[in-house]
Image: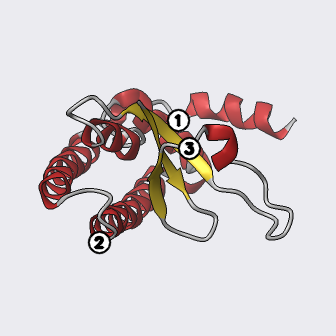
Amino acid sequence: MEEHFVESYLGGYYFSHMDEETIEEYCEECGANDTVLFTFDDEDKSEPYSSLVYYFMKDMVLNRQKLEEKLYEYDAYDKGLKQAIQEIKEDIVFNIDETKDIFKFLLENNDIDQKTYKRLIKKFNKLVGKQFSFIDTFDYSQIELKKYDNKIKKRKK
C-alpha cells in the first residue's frame, strides 16, 4: 500500500496513508497546507528506512558535479573558493543537526522504531564522514572558476 512521508505546516513530520491530494489540500482557515515529501510502498520490508535515507542524503556533496553546483550556488567566483567552501561546510553542519532532529522526532512519535532510528543514524553518520572527506581532499585545481563567470552573466540578464 502507498504511504507518504509528510511535512506538516504546523511543524514536524508524519507518515500517512491518506491520498496525496487530501494531505496537500490548502486550508483556507490557516492559510497553509502539509507537503508530501516522498511516497513509498509500505509492504516493502526495507521501508521506511530506504526512502528516508535516500530523501535526507540526496543533497549530500559526494561527487564533483554536486561540488561544482554548490560552488556556483555559493558564488565561489565572487567570494573566493575558500569562503564558498567554508559556507558550504557550515550549511552541511546545520543540515546534519536538522536531519538528526527529524530522525529523533520520528522516533519519539513512534513513527519509526529504535532499530530503524539506529540504522538511520549509523548510515547518515557514515555518509556525512564521506562528504566532509570528499570536500577536504578534493583537488580544487581541477575546477576553473572562470566558467562560472559566464553563468553569472547569464543569470544577471
Which residue is located at x 27 percent, y 65 percent? 107
Distance between the alpha carbons at the discs numbered 1 and 3: 47 Å
Q: Tell me the mark number nearer the camera, choosing from 1 and 2.
A: 2
Residue 78 visible at all: yes
Residue type of the residue flagged with mark 2: Glu
Which residue is located at x 69 percent, y 29 percent? 150
Distance between the alpha carbons at the discs numbered 3 and 2: 22 Å
Q: Secondary structure at mark 1?
A: loop
Residue type of the residue flagged with mark 1: Leu
From the image, tell me which residue sits under label 2.
108
Which residue is located at x 29 percent, y 72 percent? 108
Q: Quarter of the image containing the N terminus?
A: top left
Q: Tell me the mark number nearer the camera, choosing from 3 and 2.
A: 3
From the image, tell me which residue sits under label 3.
18
**Residue 46 drawn at (x, y percent):** 21, 34
Q: Quarter of the image containing the C terminus?
A: top right
Q: Tell me the mark number nearer the camera, choosing from 1 and 3.
A: 3
**Residue 2 drawn at (x, y percent):** 45, 32
Q: Secondary structure at mark 3?
A: loop
**Residue 120 drawn at (x, y percent):** 21, 51
Residue 75 visible at all: no
Q: Is residue 132 left or right of residue 140?
A: left
Can you tell which quarter of the image residue 11 is in? bottom right
Say whether marks 1 and 3 touch (CB < 8 Å): no
**Residue 55 drawn at (x, y percent):** 40, 41
Which mark is drawn over residue 145?
1
Can you tell which quarter of the image residue 125 is in? bottom left
- Say which label, 1 or 3, has the lower sequence index: 3
- Say which label, 3 or 2, has the lower sequence index: 3
Which residue is located at x 51 percent, y 36 percent? 69
Q: Give above or below for 75 relative to 94.
A: above
